[in-house]
Image (cartoon, helix red, strand yellow):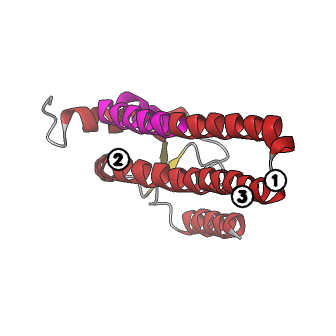
Amino acid sequence: MKKILLVVLAIFVFSSLAVTQTQRLAYVDSETILGQLQEAQDAKIAVDEAVKQWQDELDKMGRDLDSSLQDYQNKSALFSPQKKDEEQKRLAGMQQNIRDLQLKRQQDAAQLRDTKFQPIRTKVLKAIEGVAKEEGFTFVFDKLNQTVLLFADVKYDLTYKVIDRLKRGPSGKTK
């Protein structure tokens, strides 16, 4: 559905261009822009560090579960049926806790990424808008979203102008 919508949008844009030649297209490479921004690199490091801590926590819980399972297997022959049932329930509970925490940590990671990168995305979009208006472009596409952008001449690449704007600010002063 999303691809169909994008194709319809592309057809609309390009058919509109045939009617009115005053519209200009350009593109940026958002990956390159984010790679050049220190605050984006810092945000990525912060997210990666948090995710690593969470993964270490899950790994420890997994090792504890493995150890408990091994212990259960070694001693289960000595357990009464009631004790076996209790241990199996305890192990299943441990396993469920790991799954629940893993899901929560995935959600936490997505939320942390959104929180860290939303101000950066807003800043980049404002810079793109500013450069596009100054350069007289009606539409600016992201090179990474190749669903619509099938070819791009480098002379319409605004990536480095956007990076320059982000580093210098809209007035052209170095920050």
The amino acid beneath tag 2 is: Lys
Residue nearer the viewer, 5 or 66: 66
Tell me if residue 127 comes above or below residue 157 in the rendering.
Answer: below
* Total labels drawn: 3
Residue 50 locus on image (x, y percent): 42, 38
Front position among marks 2 and 3: 3
Pointer 3 local density, CA inside 10 Å: few below 14, some 14–19, many at least 20: few
Tell me if residue 18 comes above or below residue 66 in the rendering.
Answer: below
Residue nearer the viewer, 121 or 51: 51
Residue nearer the viewer, 17 or 131: 131
- The residues colored magenta run 31-55
The amino acid beneath tag 3 is: Glu
What is the spatial separation of the Cα atoms under label 2 and label 1, in whole angstroms? Answer: 53 Å
**Residue 49 colored in magenta in the image:** yes
Mark 2 lies on a secondary structure that is helix
Q: Which mark is residue 55?
A: none
The amino acid beneath tag 1 is: Ser
**Residue 65 colored in magenta in the image:** no
Quarter of the image where one finds residue 38: top left
Q: Which mark is residue 116?
A: 2
Front position among marks 2 and 1: 1
Pointer 2 local density, CA inside 10 Å: few below 14, some 14–19, many at least 20: some
Residue found at x 54% / y 37%: 55
Pointer 1 local density, CA inside 10 Å: few below 14, some 14–19, many at least 20: few
Q: Considering the image in quadrants, where does the C terminus appear? A: top left
Mark 1 lies on a secondary structure that is loop
Q: Which mark is residue 86?
A: 3
Label 1 sits on residue: 80
Dot 2 or dot 3: first in sequence order is 3
Tell me if residue 143 comes above or below residue 9 in the rendering.
Answer: above
